[in-house]
């Protein structure tokens, strides 16, 4: 019996071919069919789809759909635009992604810890001036979000000698990390953080979470790394706090609109490092193995992988 799997997403045709070539050979008695090649008859019977930034409305045209497997960890658009559909949404959970993110968090934390933005500015203006060195144990790092990515990042930072605190929706326990939980403790961690790292999922609760009031709670001279979603930080408020010198620097890898428009003021600010969403790219080799395993388990047992909780949004 040959099972049919829909592939639905917005990506260049050459990228789609790469994914199909990576996943297809790992499947037994199953065929992946790109959305534009699916017939009306096939559409009526397909139970599972692989998705990559799809138009959510396209998924509603599959009446027998039971679940979708995302190629990315972020699935917030599907959750927000399809609140009442019957099928489950499974995001990519790849241990390789967590280690890649932890590596990026550590690299850019060191970038801020060792005052690289200041020395880049000084080089541009031919200024020879040495700054004081803060010891690792005296640099307070705050990690927002303790999912798989946040936990890996917090542990990596701790192992490298930083003083690490972390905040999540529910209280977690990580050896050597001071954990905070709930909205009532968000202000507490912000008030004692020198470098704030945002790894939160985008939900109705986290949209605009780091607003003007909460940014003002950070100590003078604090910096921010945002590797989650652009909508979590109030961009205008962030710029104001940077321009007033309340905040020192922001490393931004995610934005409300991507690619970042060339007209955006963020490109020009010497207090902002702009990255093109590269903190934790999906590894096609490991992701394909996970996706194929999830699909084959479903076809063999009927078991759907752990899906996101729609109430939570992740």
Image: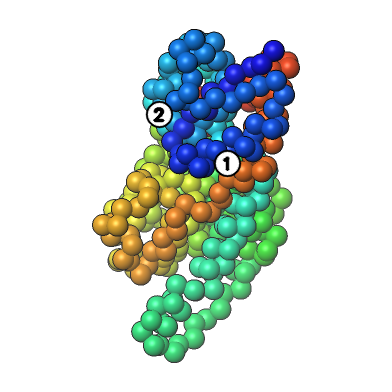
Q: In the image, residue 251 lies at what x, y percent? A: 45, 60
Along the line of sight, the residue nearer the viewer: 54 or 180: 54
Q: Secondary structure at mark 2?
A: loop
Q: Look at the image and tell me in which quarter the N terminus lies.
A: top right
For marks 2 and 1, give the one nearer the viewer. 1
Location of mark 2 (residue): 55
- Looking at the rendered structure, which numbered label has been put on residue 18? 1
Identify the image quadrant of residue 126.
Answer: bottom left
Q: Is residue 76 above or below residue 305?
A: below
Identify the image quadrant of residue 49.
Answer: top right
Q: Secondary structure at mark 1?
A: helix
Tell me what residue is drawn at x 68 percent, y 63 percent.
Answer: 160
Q: In the image, residue 10 lies at what x, y percent? A: 43, 36
Q: How is the image coloured?
A: rainbow
For label 2, the crowd category at 10 Å Cα-Cα, with few meaning under 14, some 14 to 19 and many 20 or more, is some
For label 1, the crowd category at 10 Å Cα-Cα, with few meaning under 14, some 14 to 19 and many 20 or more, is few
Tell me what residue is drawn at x 47 percent, y 16 percent.
Answer: 39
- Looking at the rendered structure, which numbered label has been put on residue 286? none
Does residue 112 appear anywhere in the picture? yes
Earlier-in-chain disc, 2 versus 1: 1
Tell me what residue is drawn at x 44 percent, y 77 percent.
Answer: 120
The answer to whether 35 appears left or right of 1 in the picture is left
Residues under labels 2 and 1: Cα distance? 20 Å
Tell me what residue is drawn at x 50 percent, y 63 percent.
Answer: 194
Q: In the image, residue 305 lies at what x, y percent? A: 65, 24
Q: Is residue 129 above or below residue 261?
A: below
Q: In the image, residue 195 lies at what x, y percent? A: 50, 61
């Amino acid at each position: 019996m040959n099972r049919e799997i829909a592939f639905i997403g917005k990506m260049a045709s050459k990228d789609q071919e790469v994914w199909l070539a990576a996943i297809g050979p790992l499947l037994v008695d199953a065929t992946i069919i790109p959305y534009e090649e699916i017939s009306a008859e096939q559409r009526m019977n397909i139970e599972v789809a692989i998705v990559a930034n799809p138009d959510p409305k396209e998924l509603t045209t599959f009446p027998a759909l039971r679940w979708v497997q995302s190629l990315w960890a972020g699935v917030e658009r599907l959750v927000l635009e399809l609140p009442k559909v019957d099928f489950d949404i499974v995001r990519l959970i790849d241990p390789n992604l967590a280690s890649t993110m932890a590596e990026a968090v550590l690299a850019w934390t060191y970038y801020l810890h060792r005052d690289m933005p200041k020395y880049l500015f000084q080089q541009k203006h031919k200024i020879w001036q040495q700054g004081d060195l803060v010891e690792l144990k005296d640099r307070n790092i705050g990690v927002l979000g303790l999912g798989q990515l946040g936990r890996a990042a917090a542990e990596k930072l701790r192992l490298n000698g930083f003083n690490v605190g972390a905040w999540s929706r529910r209280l977690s326990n990580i050896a050597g990390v001071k954990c905070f939980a709930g909205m009532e403790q968000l202000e507490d961690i912000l008030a004692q953080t020198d470098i704030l790292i945002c790894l939160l999922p985008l939900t109705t609760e986290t949209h605009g979470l780091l607003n003007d009031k909460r940014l003002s709670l950070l100590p003078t001279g604090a910096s921010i790394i945002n590797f989650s979603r652009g909508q979590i930080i109030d961009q205008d408020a962030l710029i104001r706090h940077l321009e007033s010198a309340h905040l020192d620097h922001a490393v931004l890898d995610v934005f409300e609109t991507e690619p970042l428009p060339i007209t955006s003021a963020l490109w020009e600010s010497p207090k902002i490092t702009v990255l093109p969403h590269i903190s934790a790219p999906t590894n096609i080799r490991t992701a394909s193995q996970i996706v194929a395993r999830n699909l084959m388990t479903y076809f063999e047992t009927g078991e759907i992988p752990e899906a996101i909780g729609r109430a939570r949004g992740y």
